[in-house]
Image: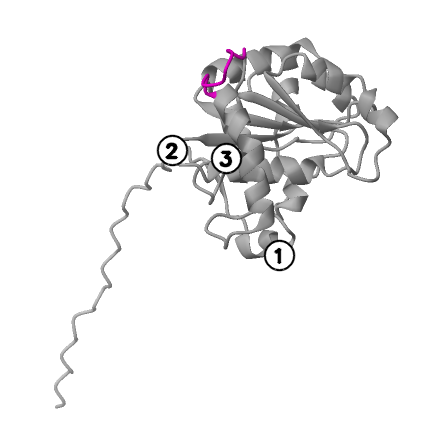
């Protein structure tokens, strides 16, 4: 008589213990950080920190001294809103954006001054493109949306003391927004909230639109860039 084989105990795999799903973490607010390609912008003729001494760097050192003095209340006479500096020209193509960027970077290289560069040439913005950065929200978005704050669209760069406020999302009535009451309120807010910071506006040319002239009335200082040997004296006088 054959003995029945002993039955082996069935092995049942252990069921995995379900762990409760983690609630998604609340996103933390981080500043908009952008890295400027310093080598590339230097090759395009723009200033960069720690570069070897150049004629352009020396020229902007001369230009910035009285502007910084007025902005910080150290000039011969007090200047209201002296930290708001508008860079403009009579006509397009005279180099005002190039000058605005170089002036901002030159001031950012100072030990004691921080700078915000605002692309206020909203009809023909060029600051981001010249610095090799993609389009981004900015000034026009703040003017259209009362709930949007400057700090939410301002770009912090790898030049330690330089931040950028782009022109923002294109708008069919961009130049009108520049002359609106919302812009005036924004300028008042900027001059008080950022009173320790020099704010440089790359504005539209003065003879191209009336909005630039409206903007100029709210600035503490205005710098006019002239294309030497090219711009007519009549245009500069006008």
The quadrant in which residue 89 appears is top right
Indicate whether 147 appears above or below 42.
Answer: above
Q: Which mark is residue 26?
A: 2
In front of the other: 187 or 77 = 77
Question: Could you tell me how far apart the alpha carbons at marks 2 and 3 are, in whole angstroms?
Answer: 37 Å
Answer whether residue 101 is visible to the viewer in this image.
yes
Instruction: Point out the stretch of residues depicted in magenta.
Output: 72-80
Indicate whether residue 74 is drawn in magenta: yes
Q: Residue at x 48, y 47 (%)?
A: 49
Indicate whether residue 237 is drawn in magenta: no
Indicate whether 210 appears above or below 24.
Answer: above
Of the residues under marks 1 and 3, which one precedes in the sequence? 1
Left/right of residue 212 with respect to residue 23 in the rendered view? right
Indicate whether 219 appears above or below 56.
Answer: above
At mark 1, the secondary structure is helix
Question: Could you tell me how far apart the alpha carbons at marks 1 and 3 are, in whole angstroms?
Answer: 20 Å
Q: Position of residue 206 (x, y in %)?
A: 78, 23
Residue underneath mark 3: 107
Left/right of residue 40 with respect to residue 12 in the rendered view? right
Classify mark 1: residues with Cα within 10 Å, few (<14), some (14-19) or many (20+).
few
Dots 2 and 3: beta carbons under 8 Å? Answer: no
Classify mark 3: residues with Cα within 10 Å, few (<14), some (14-19) or many (20+).
many
Q: Residue at x 39, y 31 (%)?
A: 112
In front of the other: 210 or 175 = 210
Q: Position of residue 20 (x, y in %)?
A: 29, 41
Residue underneath mark 1: 43
């Amino acid at each position: 008589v054959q003995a029945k084989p002993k039955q082996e105990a069935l092995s049942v795999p252990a069921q995995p213990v379900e762990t409760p799903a983690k609630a998604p973490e609340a996103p933390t607010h981080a500043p908009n950080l952008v890295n400027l390609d310093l080598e590339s912008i230097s090759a395009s003729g723009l200033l960069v920190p720690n570069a070897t001494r150049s004629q352009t760097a020396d020229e902007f050192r001369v230009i910035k001294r009285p502007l910084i003095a007025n902005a910080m209340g150290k000039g011969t006479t007090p200047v209201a809103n002296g930290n708001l500096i508008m860079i403009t020209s009579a006509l397009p193509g005279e180099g005002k954006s190039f000058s605005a960027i170089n002036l901002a970077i030159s001031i950012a290289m100072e030990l004691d001054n921080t700078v915000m560069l605002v692309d206020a040439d909203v009809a023909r913005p060029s600051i981001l493109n010249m610095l090799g950065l993609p389009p981004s929200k900015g000034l026009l978005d703040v003017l259209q949306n009362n709930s949007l704050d400057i700090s939410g669209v301002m770009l912090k760069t790898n030049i330690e003391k330089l931040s950028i406020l782009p022109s923002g999302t294109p708008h069919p009535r961009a130049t009108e927004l520049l002359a609106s009451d919302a812009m005036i309120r924004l300028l008042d807010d900027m001059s008080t909230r950022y009173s320790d910071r020099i704010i440089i506006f790359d504005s539209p040319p003065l003879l191209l639109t009336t909005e630039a002239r409206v903007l100029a009335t709210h600035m503490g200082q205005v710098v006019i860039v002239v294309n030497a040997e090219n711009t007519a004296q009549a245009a500069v006088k006008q």
